Image (cartoon, grey):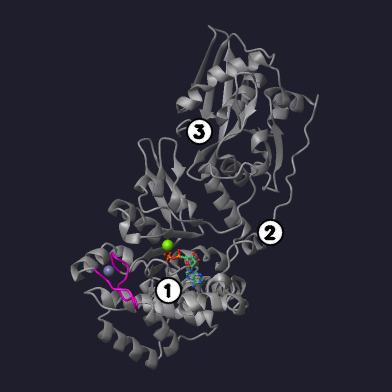
Amino acid sequence: MYSRILTGSIMGIDAETVTVETDISSGLPSMTIVGLPDTSVREAKERIRSALRNAGYQFPSKRITVNLSPADSKKEGTHFDLPIAVGVMVASGEISAGEAAQYAFFGELSLDGKVNAVQGAIALAIGLRNKGVRKLILPAGNRHEVSILTDMEIYPVAHISDVEAHLSGMNPLMPFRGRPRKSSREVCESGEDFVDVAGQEGVKRALQVAAAAAHNILMVGPPGAGKTMMARRLPGILPTMTYEECLEVTRIYSLAGQLPAEGGLITQRPFRAPHHTISPTALAGGGSKPRPGEVPLAHFGVLFLDEFPEFCRKALEVLRQPLEDEKITIARASATVTYPAKIMLVAAMNPCPCGNLGHSTRKCTCSEYQVIQYRSKISGPLADRIDIHIEIFPVPYEELIDSAGRNIKKGNSEQMRNAVEIARSVQIDRYRRERISYNSQLTPPLIKKYCPLDRESEQLLKMAFETYSLTARSGLKIIKLARTIADLEQEENISAVHVAEAISYNRFYTANRGGKANG
Ligand SMILES: Nc1ncnc2c1ncn2[C@@H]1O[C@H](COP(=O)(O)OP(=O)(O)O)[C@@H](O)[C@H]1O
Ligand SMILES: [Mg+2]
Ligand SMILES: [Zn+2]
């Protein structure tokens, strides 16, 4: 007596289909699970035996062999309980094989036969959907989370007997339909808005330029200047996520166990702001049961690192791969896991250890050496990946109260986002035949191809090179930024004004690299 039941196994954020093959033969009563099960899967035996017996079914007193195929990839998690139990029931004739073959199954069993919710349900369901599965039997506790998949039939079960009653036709279940969700636009508008930020037009502009092509940005300014306030408003001016992007983000949150219990699709771009004491593992992800860390959790959104120079060297090292390859690979004892990580890095720091350097009224107490030490922590490859460096000064108190009422319609997030959306679509269109989508991804050969400079722009750039002793790297950054600024202005050609603005976003870091100077 033999049966085949379909389920899945998580690989990174993806899932592969797994067939549970069950064979029952005469021999000493035993149950063996093969096909690289980890401890949690091997323990399934005990749960399945008790669950079936306590639910009033037979547990065959025979030799039971279960193979999880393909047999050469590791299987982790308790969600194999339900498909294995169903496999035993089909092989022993309690359930019809033909009925069971129409579904995929996952779920954890209690000893009394209850089906418990599992972590990563949405990742598993999306993976199975992408492999062509259309009907899914899963724990009732995961139903809301998975109901966002409108092109699948979801059958939630609370108990193993519900499965049997459904498949035998005794008590068929209706496919579950979730409540319709809020659109992303509504969610976006309920968030924090740039209209609350008084003054700071230059900073808002820089953030809009950053948003227009996902350029990474470094904000330098004293405490209270509004760095955190403005960074938090950045996701609200990024383009609305597509449905597939929403699904991908939702999958990552599901795997991290960070979806709210009522589930739902994540439609808002993530904003993650880990403290500077975070460990490299918490930043990247990992653990014996791998979970995505802060970097993958910021996928398609913003990773805000406040007090940037205070992060430990190893943590900053973690950022290099995602900034270069838009993904993060975690090496584990058993295998490696890769998570997508298309992030916009927003770093913030004080201008010096005391925070007052360049302040109009307060006095900086730091030595030149201390300032150099402080800034040198973010030099090199990391700084090269940050296209925009800007300085922020606090808005005077009078301006804060003054503009509270008057400024209301000026530069709100929706207007800013609309311009960003247009600039992004121009870029997507331009790079249709390339392997990139945005200006921030331009490589030197592509810069040559898509960012020609006129004579005036060339001359301006040359002057900047001499004045600020720019590196070749900074030169390329300036051209990329000029391209983005032109796109934001909906101009086809880069001109000197665009280059001039782009230079202003690179002056700070380079000009101050060598010593203590005002920006
Ligand atoms: N331009 C501004 N408009 C309105 N409020 C501001 C502005 N700048 C600062 N604030 C107020 O000051 C507080 C501190 O700003 P914050 O963003 O935490 O500064 P930073 O992160 O640079 O130390 C904010 O919560 C906000 O209430
Ligand atoms: Mg802050
Ligand atoms: Zn100082």
Instruction: Calculate the distance from the C-alpha at mark 3 to the C-alpha at mark 1.
Output: 60 Å
Query: 426 or 379: which is nearer to us?
Result: 379
At mark 3, the secondary structure is: loop
- In this view, the residue in front, 3 or 373, is 373
Quarter of the picture containing the N terminus is top right
Is the CB of mark 1 within 8 Å of ligand 1?
yes
Q: Residues within 10 Å of mark 1 (few under 14, many from 20)?
A: some
Which secondary structure, mark 2?
loop
Give the camera-side residue of 97 and 359.
Answer: 359
- The mark lying in front, picked from 2 and 3, is 2
Tell me if residue 137 comes above or below residue 305 in the rendering.
above
Q: Residues within 10 Å of mark 2 (few under 14, many from 20)?
A: few
**Residue annotated with mark 1:** 394
Question: What's the distance in space between the residues labelled 2 and 1, CA to CA?
Answer: 36 Å
Q: Amino acid at mark 1?
A: Pro
Q: Is 514 situated left or right of 443 in this image?
A: left
Label whose residue precedes the other's in the sequence (2 or 1) = 2
The x, y position of residue 445, in whole percent, is 37, 74
Tell me the magenta residue range: 352-365
The residue that disc 3 covers is: 70
Residue at 48%, 30% in the rendered image: 71
Reply above or below: 166 against 384. Answer: above
| Residue occupied by mark 2 | 183
The residue at 44%/36% (across/down) is 289
Give the quarter the ligand 2 occupies.
bottom left
Q: Which amino acid type is marked by label 2?
A: Ser
